[in-house]
Image (cartoon, coloured by chain):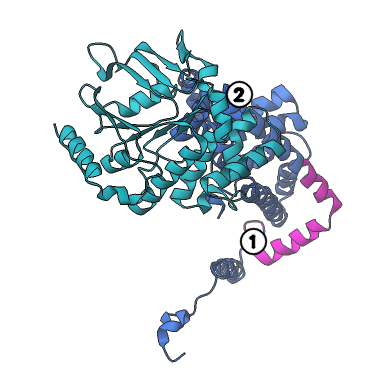
Chain colours: A cyan, B blue
Amino acid sequence: MTMQSVAAGGGNNNSITLNGAEKYFGVRGHGVQALTPTTLDIKGGEMTILLGPSGCGKTTMLRMIAGLETPTAGSIEVGGANLWSNGNRNVDALKQLGMVFQEANLFPWLTIEENIALPLKLRGIDKAGRQAKAAELCKLVGISGFEKRFPKELSGGMRQRAAIARALSYDPNILLMDEPFGALDAITRDTMNGELQRIWMETGKTVVLVTHSITEAVFLASRIILLSPRPGRVQEIIDVPFERPRDSSIHKLPEFQSIVAHLRTQLEH
Amino acid sequence: MSEKNNNPSAEGPAQFPAWIGSLLLLFVFLGGWEAYVRFFNVSKLILPPPSAVGMQWIKFLADKNVWFHTGVTAWETFLGFILASILGVGLGMILGKMPRLERMLNPFVIATQVIPKVALVPLFIVWFGFGITSKVVIATILAFFPILLNTVLGVKSVERGHSEVMASINASPMQRLVHLDFPSSLPYILTGMEVGVVLSIIGAVVGEYLGGNVGLGNLAVREMNTYNTTALFAVIVHLSVLGFAFYAIVVGARKYLIPWHGSSN
């Protein structure tokens, strides 16, 4: 998988660029500016965390990158291709994106396997191909043996694993995650952070993850993009140097604690 | 077993399944009816005793002629229900996906809802004749509205998160309809069909009351015209059983079509 995506990456194929991207909800002058014009490079292959309090525009930024919100002004490039052209989404750019939401959003009438392979079904891949890919992905995300179960039979953490597998099913270069573990309990959440790091290292995808948890951000991030609210804007960009794979022991490192303390001060402004 | 709380039945009076209670109530009702008729010597023309109705119904079950009428009514109901389902689900999906069109048509839908449609039956008989067509049309129209309204409600109730998944994987509008809107609406559609199937029987029978010379509705009118109240009651019993069978099929379909939904448990 790693070799494949490196080959497919070719170079800078999995980076994201925002050029003055702005989001305004409602009529200009009377609405809410969710994100001020933002210019930003998200490097390919990195784990980038968008961190900030609610209302800082982090989710809006992610949803614009995912093609779920239209930028009011500016442009967004995904893997070198413009995501929006004349108000329409560019399919070539969209194909490189996989999205994971806060809720797993699995379809309750489909089995786990069918849920994971739904994007492939829409792309006209035959049943054997879909089942093979679903089995491979179940193994990757650690839910092998649950292929034929229905979502309601799985725990919240396992459902979110299936949602990650679904987002990876068509092998996008970039995985976008909107507070993916926000609805899970603290213990499951820690496990899932470790699992996400492993999946990211095995697949070599570019990951952009939104969170409001400082420790989650510092644990996962290659880079943290700190946003501040009213109006939403990028306040600071912080590189997180710890070696991979990281485990929970890094919480005890003085350097870890100083980054956390710094971020907390910034967020309390 | 010396501990009392090990035994749930020790907590109160003996528990029995609810259906036994239903059956008991039925016997109490029938017994009361029978006793009333016998004690007050009520004329058979006004209210026949349930025992006589039961005997008459058993005679019906051996009567080929009754089965012919049953077949006619069942066929009209079936056709009307199927047509109403196709039209109601089809139009409901379209209106559910096009909120502007739905808002535009809403006053007309409400207007046609509040018209007592049964009052239009003579008109349908004028338009579509005394044959089976007029009954199928009435059955269709009565069953159509609950199916339509529930389908619209189902499409509008698709979870936002599910829609966003379809948007994020770049599904076409047709793919969304087939893979999300329809399966997600099925619990609502089936609820509409449960109401609809009962109304389509009513439509067929009312049509038969007022026009033509076949079907269980027509049989009921004929028995009434000969002042055979016992037979009329037996026809009603027979119709109830037919209605129950239709209803049971639709309700039973729920378990097979939407085993994932909470309503199937």
| Percent x, y of residue B55 | 75, 64
Q: Residues within 10 Å of mark 2 (few under 14, many from 20)?
A: few
Residue at point 18% right, 40% down? A261
Q: Where does the C terminus of chain B fall, quadrant-wise?
A: bottom right
Residue at point 78% right, 31% down? B131
Q: Is residue A22 above or below residue B188?
A: above
Location of mark 2 (residue):
B174
Looking at the picture, tell me which residue is in the foreground, B243 or A150: A150
Can residue B153 be seen from the camera position used here? yes
Q: Is residue B238 above or below residue B118?
A: below
The amino acid pointed to by label 2 is: Met
The amino acid pointed to by label 1 is: Ser
Looking at the picture, tell me which residue is in the foreground, A83 or B52: A83
Location of mark 1 (residue):
B43
| Percent x, y of residue A12 | 47, 20
Looking at the picture, tell me which residue is in the foreground, A5 or B186: A5
